[in-house]
Amino acid sequence: MIKCTVWNLSPNNCNVVEVGILRAMKVLLVVHYFFPDHFYGTETYTLEVARDLKRRGYDVEILSAMSPGEKGGQEKLLFRYTYDGFTVHCVDFNFAPHSYFHQLYYRPEMYSFYHELLSTIAPDLMHVTHLMNHTAVILEAADACAIPVVATLTDFFGVCFNSRLSDVKGELCSGPNSSGSKCLHCYMEAIGSEELARSFAVSRKLVDNSYFHRFSALCFAWLAKLPVGKKRGPLVQVRGLTERTEKLYNFYKIYRKMVAPTDFLHDAYVANRFSEEKMVKINFGINWDVVADFRTVRKYDATRPLRFGYIGQLADHKGVDMLVRAFKAVGGDKELLLYGSPGPGSPYYEKLVEICAGDHSVIFAGTFPETELGKRLSEIDVLVIPSRWHENSPLVLLYALATRTPVIVSAVKGMTEFVRDGENGLTFKRGSLADLTRVIGLIMENPAIIEGFSERADYRKTISDHVDEIEHLYQEI
């Protein structure tokens, strides 16, 4: 709460007049998922920003969501709960599943819902850390409610339907073309020939090659722009995909400012016509309390196995299977700790278990509270981030550097901005099993290099430093 006074400077009166108490500025943080069921990078970032804003006197609430298929909350579209002292509004999309592709990024049928919700919460400012689930309709509703909006761009959602700015083969993509056929071709490759044949009622043999995908993408992108594309079966889906970038480009104009945590992400959005004037480069910050007691330089301990670690989602785009294969291919006394979910029952998890084939040096270590991250990092010798996609400054990397944990990372700009090959860690060619195997082998052959990497590993920007810059944007707005 802020006490406000006004000086009366009339010629005959110079008294100070107290005029009342103003409420604290109210900020609504909007995120695709949130704790306690979701606890990865964007969720952690959102929580840390919320905590620091609250410490500064802001009134902070959080808007999250739940995907269809997740265990529901309270048998209704919107429910609320409290986490770490924050009111969390959660939209349960079990009660509003999507049927069309465009509903993955824009749900006009939800406009009245979000308009009423934002009118009820009545924030002074809305800060979006991920637009997924809520979609661009929440920007439209906020604009109608005259609520200024800022964003932290945590991935490439605005320019890429898979949010990774990479094609189905994992190659870096420059972004969509004007017709949308490039994205449509990528999507057709991704969903596979069997589903295409079923969707378009044609022969599997006909669609079972990339040339068909490329040619048909051009044709369908053109047809979808005709009036018939608004009405006819698959063309409605095609239109939803080919119009995605242009629609989001226009909705993103509602943002007053957009925070880019890396040069690579900043440049990717600007290259795809998003406003450079609104883009502000601000590196992520970390919770110093989590790492302060664990900043010890690592030294090789020959009395135990050399310990590699992975912390994050157990998912294909994260490259965990490649890490396990590379680890198994290298000899020596070592172990690999895999921290993360999903648990048993996930096809990808089962794939990882199969690759391990009873190798007890690979340990599925589950998950842990975010407050233990510094401790867990201090217990491994090398953190490996083998992502196949173009990571955008993963928080676990920054925490590793802050705890002086040497790292091995894919050579993508979102990470090489912080990791200098041969100085504070090692890099390998993204997606290359052979090169990752080579790099792990280098450490196994000469584990003494860990100490040098650890001495040069560091990261000191705190979440408070980050929010200082965020708060400056709020004040500008």
Image (tube, grey):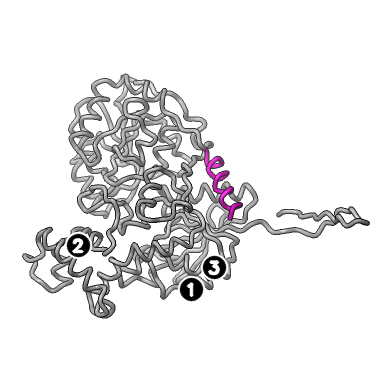
Along the horizontal axis of the image, is 77 left or right of 22?
Answer: left
Quarter of the N terminus within the rendering: bottom right
Local SS, label 2: helix
For discs 2 and 3, the disc positioned in front in the rendered view: 2
Which residues fall within the magenta stretch? 462-477
Residue 113's disc number: 1
Q: CA distance from mark 1 to mark 2?
A: 33 Å
Label 2 close to label 3 by CB (< 8 Å): no
Q: Which residue is mark 2?
A: 188
Question: What's the residue type where badge 1 is placed?
Answer: Phe
Residue 309 painted magenta: no
Q: CA distance from mark 3 to mark 1?
A: 9 Å
Secondary structure that dominates the magenta span: helix
Q: CA distance from mark 2 to mark 3?
A: 37 Å
Residue at the farthest left position: 205
Q: Which residue is mark 3?
A: 118
Q: Is residue 451 above or below residue 160?
A: above
Picture quarter containing residue 13?
Answer: bottom right
